[in-house]
Image (cartoon, grey):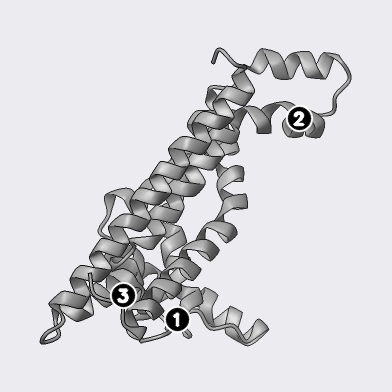
Amino acid sequence: MAALSDLELEAIRLSLRVAFWSVATSLPAGLLVAWLLARCRFPGRLLLDGLVHLPLVVPPVVIGYILLVLMGRRGPIGAWLYDTFGVTLIFTWRGAALAAAVMAFPLMVRAMRLSLEAVDRRLEAAARTLGATPLDVFLTVTLPLMSPGILVGTVLAFARSLGEFGATITFVSNIPGETRTIPVAIYTLTQTPDGDAAALRLSIVSILLALGALAMSEILARTLHRRIGGPHA
């Protein structure tokens, strides 16, 4: 495979940056939502569950358009962010990270929720009978036991963020060096004369990054399972 050009390397670096920040900023919210869906009963729970999983069942372009309406300079949230903090998300890499985070959020939440639901609540009850506070129980019992799910959800969200296209191009367009991630760059190259070779190289890089993330997720999850369950787990 020929050496990658500066434009291709730029797209790779931008994709990694977008994927990292999309996961880093959505992880606390993912934990909170997973906890609410797994442990709490409240009015509107089914609605919250549906909204969380909505990006899985609607076209990504729809999510991008919703973000454009809400987060654009004239949108209710986007206008407030700009007027209050001077922050603009549309047509920026931060907006690309937001779009990727929204699309990857259901995968993150689902992995964490399933892991949390598998935690033996008798262990938490035993810790409380020994005098542990709810926060201590969460930090010393629940969180370690659900850590494989957190890890898997994080890596899946990272891999999904690397491959996000529809919501990204709809919300933040296709700006070289700012919003042209790997998928957007591949699309651009397929529309460019003599761009097939570069598109193929970026496709291979995208596949390798995704496979590497999934393999790392599996290895680390198995390691955590062995440490939690003991040598015979």
* Direction from residue 195 to residue 120 in the image, left or right: right
Give the x, y percent position of residue 171: 37, 75
Q: Is residue 40 among the parts visible in the rendering?
A: no
State the residue position of label 2.
140
Rendered-image quadrant of the N terminus: bottom left
Separation (CA) of disc 3 from disc 2: 43 Å
The tag on residue 90 is 1
Mark sitting earlier along the chain (3/2): 2
Kind of residue indicated by mark 2: Thr
Separation (CA) of disc 1 from disc 2: 41 Å
Separation (CA) of disc 3 from disc 1: 10 Å
Give the x, y percent position of residue 83: 62, 86
Name the residue rendered at 47%, 45% in the picture: 108
Name the residue rendered at 33%, 61% in the picture: 163
> Closer to us: mark 3 or mark 2?
2
Label 2, secondary structure: give it: helix
Q: Are marks 1 and 2 in contact (CB under 8 Å)?
A: no
Label 1, secondary structure: give it: loop
Rendered-image quadrant of the C terminus: top right
> Closer to us: mark 1 or mark 2?
2
Kind of residue indicated by mark 3: Thr
State the residue position of label 3.
170
The residue lying furthest to the left in this view is 193
Give the x, y percent position of residue 211: 34, 49
The residue lying furthest to the front in this view is 2
| Of the pair 221 and 126, the residue shown nearer to us | 221
Q: Pointer 3: residues within 10 angstroms few (<14), some, or many (20+)? A: many
Label 3, secondary structure: give it: helix
* Direction from residue 160 to residue 148 in the image, left or right: right
Residue 63 vs 122, above or below: the answer is below
